[in-house]
Amino acid sequence: MMQGNYYPVEVKNPGKRPEPNKNKKRMSQSQIKLIAIISLAAILLTSATFYIINKILNPELIKVLVEPSLKYEYMVPCGEGLLLVYKNGKSGLINKYGEVVVDFIYDDIYEFNEGLAVVWTDVYIMERKSGVIDKYGNVVVDLIYRGVGPFSGGAAVVYNDGMCGVINKDGEFVVPLIYEEISGFVDGFASARKGEKWGIIDNTGEIIIDVKYDKIVRYIGNGFFATSKAYFTGLLDKYGECVLPEEYYWISYYKEDMAVIRKDGNDGYIDKNGEVAIPPAYFTANDFSDGMASVWVSDPGETLSVRSAVGRWGYIDKTGELVIPAEYDEASDFSNGFAVVRKFEQNNKRGLIDKTGRLVIPMIYDYISPVVNGLAVIGETDAANMHRRRFGVADTKGNIVIPMIYDEIEIFEGYDLLWAQKDGKEGVLNKKGDIVLPFEYGNICKNIKDNLLCAEKDGLWGIFELKNKN
C-alpha cells in the first residue's frame, strides 16, 4: 500500500504499567523545567525539519486518491472532475474517488465541454443514437440524433436524416434541420451549406453571410471570413463586405493577429485589420508564435517558384524584418521564448535558440522538444541500436538535469512533473529526475484534466491528483 508521511510503530509485549523505582533520586524543579525546555526545543526543531524537508525541499507533487484497485478496461479524465471508464465494452463515469456516477449504459461518452458531454448508444449498428448528459448523468438532450457536436457558446450542431441544425443547452432548436452541412462553431460562427452554396451562421441562428458562395466559407478569426471561388480565395468581413479580392491561393487562420496569405507561389501576411502587412515574398511562411515566424529565404538569384536547396530558414518579426538570419535547415515555431533549429553542417544535429538567435543548447542532439516549464526533452541515437533513441531533459541554459537513460519522456505542462518510460514500464519523475511514481505501471494516461491522472498496474487502475506548478 502506498503511504504518505506516516510511520506506524509496532508496540511489543504490551502489559501493565511498571512499578515506580522508589530508590530513584527525585529531580529538582529547575531540572524538570530545563528538561521540558530542551524537549520542547527538540520537538520544534524536529517539526521544522520535517516541514522543510517535506513541504519546501520535497513538496507533495502527487497525491494518491485511489490505489491501483479498479478493474476497468481503460480509464481517462474527461472533465468536470470525472473519469471516463470502460467495462465490458460499455462506457460510464466515475468520480476521483472511484465511485460510479454514470452507470455503464453507453457505447461511448465524449469529453465534457461547457459542462455537458455527448453520449452514444447503438454505435455498432446502423441505428446509432446520440444525446447529451450533464456531470450528474442527467439526460439534457434526448438520444434521438445520429450525431451531436460539442457545445460552443451554448450551441451545438445536430445531425439527423441527412440534414443539420443547431440546438441550445435545453435541447431546443436554434436553427432547424435545414442545412446539408454545418461546421463546428468557432468564436460563435459556423460555415453552413445549402445545396452547393455556402454562408455563415452564428450560434443564435442568425445568418451572418448569405448562403450564396460556390466554395466553402471559413471563419479565420478577428471577425473575418475566407471565401473561395474558382480556386482563388478572398476575405470578407462580418457584414459580407469584400476586404481582399479573390486573388489569393490560400488564407490561413489567424495566429497572434497575423494570418498567412499565398499569392503567385509566395507567402506573406495580413494583419488583424485584414490588410497586407508583409507582402508575399517567401517560398514558405509559418504562423506567428511568440511574436516571431519562421520563413524560408532563398539566396539571391534563386527562383521562389520551385524549392531550391540554396536557401535557409530564418525568423521575422511582425514588421517583416529578418531578426534572426536565414541560416538553418530546420526551424520550429517559438515556444515559451525558444525554438528548435537544425543545420546539416552540424552533423544534422539539433539545438535550441532564444529570441535573439543565441544558441542556448548546442547542436549536438538528434532530438529536442519544444520548451515546456523551462525544460526541453533531449534525445540521441543509441550507438548500439541505430533504431533506438535515449531521452533525457535539459534546461534552457543547456544543463542536463535528467540524464539520457529513458526510452521516452514527456513534460506535463503546468506541473513540475514528467512522464517517462523505461524498459517497458512507465513512471513519473519530478523536474530534478527523482522518481515520484515508480516505474511499475503498464499504462499512465497522460491526458490530465482537473489535476487528475490515472495509471494502470497489473490490470488495475488507480487515480492520482497532481499539484499545480506555482
Image (tube, grey):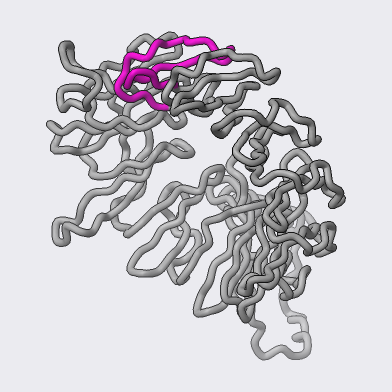
Q: Is residue 285 magenta?
A: yes
- Horizontal relation, residue 440 to residue 165: left or right: left
Please state the total of marks drawn on the protein image: 0
Image position, residue 79 (x, y; %): 69, 54
- Horizontal relation, residue 378 to residue 381: left or right: right
Q: Is residue 38 magenta?
A: no
First to last magenta residue range: 261-286
Q: Residue at x 84, y 57 (%)?
A: 140
Q: Is residue 397 above or below residue 382?
A: above
Image position, residue 60 (x, y; %): 60, 54
Front residue of this view, candidates 56 and 426: 426
Image position, residue 180 (x, y; %): 66, 46
Whether residue 433 is visible to the viewer of this picture, yes or no, is yes
Whether residue 41 is visible to the viewer of this picture, yes or no, is no
Q: Is residue 312 above or below residue 117?
A: above
Q: Residue at x 55, y 25 (%)?
A: 226
Q: Is residue 87 above or below residue 468?
A: below
Q: Residue at x 79, y 42 (%)?
A: 175
The quadrant in which the C terminus is found is top right
Residue lying farthest to the front in this orientation:
195
Front residue of this view, candidates 422 and 159: 159
Q: Residue at x 80, y 57 (%)?
A: 134
The quadrant in which the N terminus is found is bottom right
Image position, residue 23 (x, y; %): 73, 79
Q: Is residue 264 above or below residue 428?
A: above
